[in-house]
Image (cartoon, coloured by chain):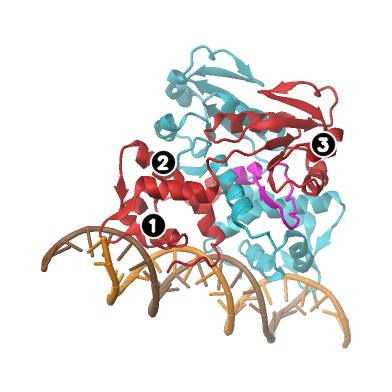
Chain colours: A cyan, B red, C brown, D orange
Amino acid sequence: MAGKDKVSEAVVRRLPTYHRYLERLAQEGTTRISSQELGQRMGLTASQIRQDINCFGTLGQQGYGYNVEELRGRIAEILGLGRAYHVIVVGAGNIGRAVTNYVGFTRLDFAVEALFDVDSTRVGERVGDAEIFSTHTLPAYLTTHRVDISIIATPAEAAQGIADELMEGGVRALWNFAPVDIAAKPGCVVQNVQLTDNLLVLTYHMLNDPAEQ
Amino acid sequence: MAGKDKVSEAVVRRLPTYHRYLERLAQEGTTRISSQELGQRMGLTASQIRQDINCFGTLGQQGYGYNVEELRGRIAEILGLGRAYHVIVVGAGNIGRAVTNYVGFTRLDFAVEALFDVDSTRVGERVGDAEIFSTHTLPAYLTTHRVDISIIATPAEAAQGIADELMEGGVRALWNFAPVDIAAKPGCVVQNVQLTDNLLVLTYHMLNDPAEQ
DNA sequence: TAGATTGTTAATCGATTAACAATC
DNA sequence: TAGATTGTTAATCGATTAACAATC
């Protein structure tokens, strides 16, 4: 009787972590795990783990626990792992290139197929297997190529405009590294990364946590 | 009568965002702002903004609102912006180099002073202004140089070991990009970045949010 | 002064934890 | 069967929102 209600964002953000720990367990050869033990490893309560997993149906078995590979596989499926995505990058500067390479290096099936940049001196260069095109050609590209995910790595000022172009062109997911919060349109999802914000959370704790227990 | 109680993590994570919006407002020449209007821009309730700001003392004025530059300055101070930090990077591969350049490109005063890598063919190379040293020399480096923040960009397997070395050596903050959760020791703070996890949250929403109203 | 807007207390909402009957 | 451990309901905790008196 598991709820298909609406999975809370808190749960969604923990899913990739579950996947990471389960993958590790599978690698170590562990075939079954209890919520208790998984909680210990992940630093969560057993109760929370059972609640989280129950959002997606009945995956455990009383008296036994969870089958590691089965649970991992199910979460992988929920997260959309194992599918191939068509990915482009807008902004082929420092960040755009780094993320392009980064994505290529992970074991994810997310290869960048093209980059776009306004700087004409960059046009024609290659980053990994992908070529850099002029940003002017982006709308045309979108009409002739399917793009699932676009990475935005432009300066802050250009980001929302580019995002609008991408969403108009049918891109359904934006992964934004520009230091502005991109507003999503209906039918499109956005993750704003804000690495700098994360670094400031680090310095905050370094300076303000009293000797850190 | 503002509380110095203990600022919740939810509030801390919003602080850099406040700073970003206030910086933008200051650039636009806005000198004062109400919680109402700031909330509108940031997508938060006015109530929440007042609650958040109140964690840090009385910064507004009834009938007026908040002075943009004053509030921005105070938050900058709380976050430790404007200080200079001694930063090193361990792992000079794809991610380590990218983050080194990235940090150099932000307007933050966070310059990487040295990188370390186990691959001896990389030793002696430069990334921006910083040289790559052998990871074997890391403990010695830590005894002769002050390091505030270390970025970890090693493979997953090496990350916790390196983190332990760094914490032993007196580094007080770790910014971890390896795909494992680093456990902090007392006196040290850690931010685990997990870019891949973030990408999977994106694909989750792309696949599971019903037409995304 | 009157109007605006904060600081702060109280009410609500949602997420986490605890408890336990169901069941493998 | 007895023991283990889930699925699920209830209790608790914390964060967000609402309300309003204080005050600029």
Q: Quadrant of the N terminus of chain A?
A: bottom right
Question: What residue is at 80 percent from the left and 28 percent from the top?
Answer: B133
Check contact, mark 1 vs mark 3: CB within 8 A.
no
Chain under disc 3: B
Q: Is residue A48 left or right of residue D17?
A: right
The reply to whether residue B144 is in sight is: yes
Q: Quadrant of the C terminus of chain A?
A: bottom right
Compared to residue A25, the image places residue B4 above or below, namely below
Quadrant of res A130? top right
Give the residue pinned by disc 3.
Answer: B138
Compared to residue B55, the image places residue A154 above or below, namely above
Tag 3: Cα neighbours inside 10 Å, few (<14), some, or many (≥20)? some
Quadrant of res A137? top left
Q: Residue A162, how many percent across, how many down?
A: 43, 30
Label 1 element class = loop
Give the residue pinned by disc 1.
Answer: B59
In the rendered structure, find residue B23 and report the number of the disc placed on it.
2
